Image (tube, rainbow, N blue to C red):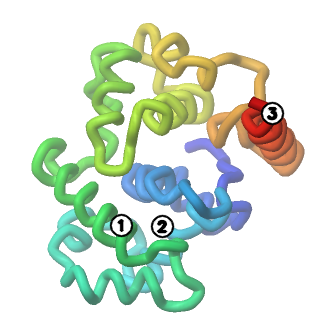
Amino acid sequence: MPTLYLSTEPDADALLADDPLALLIGMLLDQQVPMERAFVAPFRLAQRLSMTRLEPAAIASYDPEALAEIFATPPSLHRFPGAMAARTQKLCQMILDEFDGDAATIWREASSGADLVRRLGRLPGFGKQKAQIFAALLGKQFGVRPDGWREAAGDYGDAGVHRSVADITDEASLQKVREHKKQMKAAAKRG
């Protein structure tokens, strides 16, 4: 089990390292909020649901309005708690329906890096870029390396760079990823 530094809270990072569903939900929520907030959310969700590990069946069958309220309870789990609660339920339902309730099956049964990115890209809230970043995270920090995983992960699979959550292992690498993102935003503004 890797030592992660995505939420910057040891207990939350330990859950992410140990619970594949928590890791997927953290990645799902990693949009339009600071990375740390997205990746601490699965831990807070588990606490609010009185779970030690997130259970896809329990989340998928939870009353949607009640789950949205759990997401909205201060500190909210996301900037858009209702939409993200619904998306989390869809993710959990898909894991039940297509992966026998085991989130790790998504990557454990991938036949290649391209297949892994394709499987991830089908998940609710995961587009190509998010799928590539998650594949890079699995490869770099979890040792999930089906043939061609680096190529399938695109630039996020490159070794020795600091582009995304896949490259964050400590405070120094977190700052390098933040600097890279600032540079990318500045370049985009310049056109």
User: Do tag 1 and tag 3 residues touch (Cβ < 8 Å)?
Assistant: no
**Where 157 sits versus 44, above or below?**
above
**Where 52 sits versus 179, above or below?**
below
**Residue 80 place in picture, x, y as percent:** 47, 73
**Where 107 sits versus 79, above or below?**
above
**Residue 18 place in picture, x, y as percent:** 48, 53
Q: CA separation, marks 3 and 2?
A: 36 Å
Q: Residue at x 77, y 24 (%)?
A: 161
Mark 3 and mark 2 lie on one chain; the one further toward the N terminus is 2
- What residue did someone put label 2 on? 42
Left or right: 173 as drawn, with respect to 24 = right
Q: Amino acid at mark 1?
A: Leu
Q: How many other residues sit within 10 Å of disc 1, few (<14), some (14-19) or many (≥20)?
A: many
Q: Amino acid at mark 3?
A: Arg
Where the N terminus falls, by quadrant? top right
Q: Residue at x 31, y 19 (%)?
A: 115
> Disc 3 vs disc 2: which is toward the camera?
3
Q: CA separation, marks 1 and 3?
A: 43 Å
Mark 2 and mark 1 lie on one chain; the one further toward the N terminus is 2
User: Do tag 2 and tag 1 residues touch (Cβ < 8 Å)?
Assistant: yes
For label 3, the SS is helix
Q: Looking at the image, which is closer to me, 23 or 69?
A: 69
Q: CA separation, marks 2 and 1?
A: 8 Å
Q: Amino acid at mark 2?
A: Pro
The mark found on residue 190 in the picture is 3
Q: Residue at x 15, y 54 (%)?
A: 96
- What residue did someone put label 1 on? 54
Residue 24 appears in the picture as rendered? yes
> Disc 2 vs disc 1: which is toward the camera?
2
